[in-house]
Image: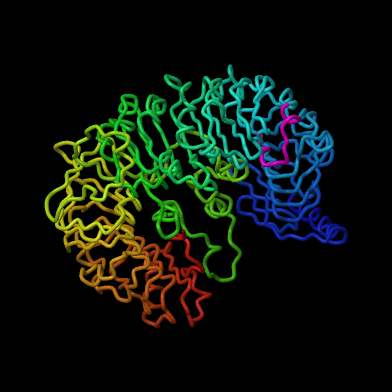
């Protein structure tokens, strides 16, 4: 069989070179056997044959080059223009087909003939339109088992697609473009199994109260409304009696559990009025992003007012029985008392995310003060924009570190060998940037070909190794007295910062595991000789495992932080703080310590680094990126035998800064972006010896002016991988 495939593809390659001048290199892998073909990449994994023919400049589908047993076929980023009749008729076993971004503007009526087993079809980002010559509803009549159809980001394809639902009654997942007047009519009642529905609303300008009437009796659980590019409201001319987005537009979504609305800039107050019909409903996850007024309108007073969320504004939101709530990147300046701590949220909410807003500007942080009242809260996120790049998400910290991830061979300078297409490499090459490195390769490939980052496939949660980066500022023991709405608009010239001494006590909800504060405390905040005490009960804040305190302009904090008895992850990056030498002694369980880009240049000059981590005997991951360091103590890590990852990129080291004899378990050393010109014979000898004892060891030396020839050293990586941002 292998010989036949080889001969067939060699003949096809000659024909293509003569007729279309198309060539491509590829590899076929059947378990441990590699065979070179001239068409696509074929991988047999877990008894599933996956063929990747993307980015080959194909103008038509070359069936003779495809194994008839193909089950997953990827044709993305080609120039197919048209799918002709019988394009896939020999692939009777095909279950998943992706043809994204391939300039397809015409699909003939029998193009999918023979694909009765097809379950997933992705036609997004092509040139299909409502024209029978472009796409006939009968085109889908052969896809009787189709369950997932991704066909959004085309040219106004709506009517013909709706007429095709009579043939695709088994659809459970659908993405499509919304029409100018959003109308999900009676034809959607045919999709009795529809579970996950995404509408790309680029062309939408009107959302009437009967927009989703066709779903009133459906079992739809997840709805995503994405990208209202032509949908804007001028706050100066806003008429509450008439709006392009009717307050009752969502009334027919009786079974909905997850709702996501992105880039619908009708104003925060207007958006908050849309959820009255979800009170006492099954909705448990609500994600709102970029809902503030557009910046094109010069209305600073109205913009500021819209950014203050009062109890009257959130009267419907606070009555929802949500477990997950996110309202991000929406110019929220302040949230009034009582909004977060409503009775419904106290007993249900588990995840709160107010990231990339502006609450640090005015100093009102009532969600932090009230978090202690939320009995089931596990994560709370409140961040302001990064003042340097206007993006609080640009700091990713440990986003790529996983125990099951190794640097693929393709990223290292080896012996000019071809990278193997093993499972780990395919996860890196096919997986999305934010993938969780699923152990099931078939699932990874399916996610790469058929999922979209804007689609919520399940409630907002994080199942990564270390929990979601959740963010909660300190919950202070402070008076939560009533405050008038007018007073909320007054800028406080004297925020309630502590004096030069004393102890701040922060009460936290019993379930809280992740506390995150980023770019929220503004100004030169001198906390003096303060001590911070975190507690939930007599045993302290023992459930907290992750503490992020990044970019908060704190200039001095010489006291202690007590009560975090089970802390595993600690990030104090981008601060100007000065701490005592015993500051980290209270966190003996910390495994990951991040001190990137410290603003105080004297931080590491006054405090010996080896003393800072003296009692961190469980430390695995240590990040000192961008601190202008050129020297490290020779005994560093003498008390940290478990250290496995050391990140020293963007500093000023000119030689190997650590003694390899003290880091017997080191798997990754990042020295990229330093001033290393060469490695001495002694350094190379110690590195080579270490790599023999730790076979998975990798050394990153990108952006150094290395003069030696290192291409034969397999543990030296070509580029920065694990700490790449």
Coordinates of residue 394 in the picture (x, y in percent): 44, 55
Question: Farthest residue toward the right?
Answer: 19
Of residue 130 and residue 535, the one placed in the foreground of this image is 130
| In magenta segment, residue 153 | yes
Rendered view: 315 above or below 533: above
Quadrant location of residue 619? bottom left
455 relative to 538 in the view: left or right: right
Expressed as whole percent of the image width and height from the top left, the position of residue 527 reads 19, 56
Judge by depth and name the residue closer to the eye, 73 or 384.
Answer: 384
User: In the rendered view, would you say 419 is above or below 676?
Assistant: above
| Residue drawn where x is 39% and y is 64% of the image | 694
Q: Which quadrant of the structure image shows residue 501?
A: bottom left
Q: Residue at point 75% right, 44% down?
A: 127
Q: Quadrant of residue 616?
A: bottom left
Res 379 visible: yes
Is 663 positioned to the left or the right of 15 in the image?
left
Task: Give the image location of residue 592, x and y in percent.
Answer: 31, 55
State the residue in front, 508 or 336. 336
| Residue in the picture at 53% in, 30% down | 239
Outermost left residue:
502
Query: Which stretch appears magenta?
Result: 149-162
Indicate the position of residue 277 as horizontal and vertical percent values: 48, 21
Residue sitting at 71 percent across and 53 percent down? 40
Q: Nearer the viewer, residue 152 or 267?
A: 267
Look at the picture and state if 725 lies above or below 348.
below
């Amino acid at each position: 069989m292998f010989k036949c495939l080889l001969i067939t593809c060699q003949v096809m390659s000659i024909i293509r070179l003569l007729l279309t001048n198309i060539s491509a290199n590829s590899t076929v892998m059947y378990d441990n056997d590699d065979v070179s073909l001239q068409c696509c990449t074929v991988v047999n994994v877990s008894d599933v044959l996956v063929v990747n023919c993307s980015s080959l400049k194909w103008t038509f589908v070359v069936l003779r080059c495809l194994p008839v047993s193909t089950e997953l076929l990827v044709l993305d980023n080609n120039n197919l223009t048209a799918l002709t009749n019988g394009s896939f008729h020999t692939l009777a076993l095909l279950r998943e087909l992706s043809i994204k971004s391939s300039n397809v503007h015409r699909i003939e009526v029998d193009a999918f003939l023979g694909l009765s087993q097809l379950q997933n079809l992705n036609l997004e980002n092509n040139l299909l339109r409502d024209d029978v010559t472009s796409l006939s509803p009968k085109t889908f009549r052969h896809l009787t088992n189709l369950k997932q159809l991704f066909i959004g980001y085309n040219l106004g394809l709506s009517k013909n697609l709706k007429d095709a639902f009579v043939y695709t009654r088994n659809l459970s997942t659908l993405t499509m473009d919304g029409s100018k007047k959003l109308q999900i009519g009676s034809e959607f009642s045919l999709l009795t199994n529809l579970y996950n529905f995404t509408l790309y609303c680029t062309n939408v300008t009107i959302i009437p109260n009967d927009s989703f009437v066709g779903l009133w009796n459906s079992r739809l659980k997840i709805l995503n409304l994405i990208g209202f590019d032509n949908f804007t409201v001028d706050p100066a001319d806003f008429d509450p009696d008439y709006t392009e987005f009717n307050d009752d537009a969502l009334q027919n979504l009786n079974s909905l559990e997850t709702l996501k609305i992105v880039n619908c800039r009708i104003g925060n107050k207007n958006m908050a009025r849309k959820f009255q019909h979800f009170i006492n409903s099954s909705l448990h996850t609500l994600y709102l992003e970029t809902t503030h007024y557009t910046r094109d309108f010069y209305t600073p007073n109205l913009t500021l007012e819209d950014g203050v969320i009062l109890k009257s504004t959130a009267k419907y939101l606070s009555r929802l029985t949500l477990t997950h709530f996110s309202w991000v990147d929406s110019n929220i300046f302040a949230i009034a008392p009582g909004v977060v701590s409503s009775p419904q949220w106290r007993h249900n909410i588990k995840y709160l995310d107010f990231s990339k807003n502006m609450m640090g500007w005015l100093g009102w942080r009532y969600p932090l003060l009230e978090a202690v009242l939320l009995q089931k809260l596990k994560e709370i996120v409140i961040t302001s924009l990064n003042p340097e790049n206007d993006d609080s998400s640009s700091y990713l910290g440990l986003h790529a570190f996983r125990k099951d991830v190794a640097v693929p061979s393709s990223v290292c300078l080896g012996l000019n060998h071809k990278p193997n297409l093993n499972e780990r490499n395919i996860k890196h090459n096919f997986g999305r940037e934010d993938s969780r490195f699923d152990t099931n390769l078939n699932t990874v490939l399916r996610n790469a070909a058929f999922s979209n980052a804007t689609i919520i496939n399940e409630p907002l949660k994080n199942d990564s190794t270390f929990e979601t980066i959740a963010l909660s500022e300190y919950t202070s023991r402070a008076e939560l007295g009533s405050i008038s709405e007018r007073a909320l608009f007054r800028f406080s010239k004297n925020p309630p910062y502590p004096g030069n001494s004393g102890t701040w006590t922060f009460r936290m909800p019993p379930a809280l595991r992740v506390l995150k504060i980023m770019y929220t405390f503004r100004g030169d905040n001198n906390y003096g000789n303060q001590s911070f005490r975190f507690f939930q009960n007599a045993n302290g804040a023992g459930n907290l495992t992750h503490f992020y305190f990044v970019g908060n302009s704190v200039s001095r904090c010489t006291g202690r932080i007590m009560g975090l008895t089970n802390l595993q992850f600690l990030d104090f990056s981008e601060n100007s703080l000065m701490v005592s030498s015993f500051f980290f002694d209270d966190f003996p369980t910390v495994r990951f310590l991040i001190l990137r880009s410290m603003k105080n240049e004297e931080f590491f000059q006054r405090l010996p680094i080896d003393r800072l981590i003296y009692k961190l005997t469980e430390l695995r991951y240590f990040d000192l990126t961008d601190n202008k360091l050129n020297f490290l103590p020779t005994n560093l890590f003498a008390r940290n035998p478990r250290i496995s990852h050391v990140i020293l990129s963007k500093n000023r080291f000119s030689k190997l800064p650590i003694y390899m004899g003290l880091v017997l378990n080191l798997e990754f050393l990042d020295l990229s972006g330093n001033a290393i010109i060469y490695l001495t014979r002694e350094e190379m000898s110690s590195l080579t010896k270490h790599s023999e004892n730790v076979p998975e060891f990798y050394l990153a030396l990108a952006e150094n002016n290395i003069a030696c020839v290192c291409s034969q050293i397999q543990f030296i990586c070509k580029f920065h991988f694990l700490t790449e941002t």
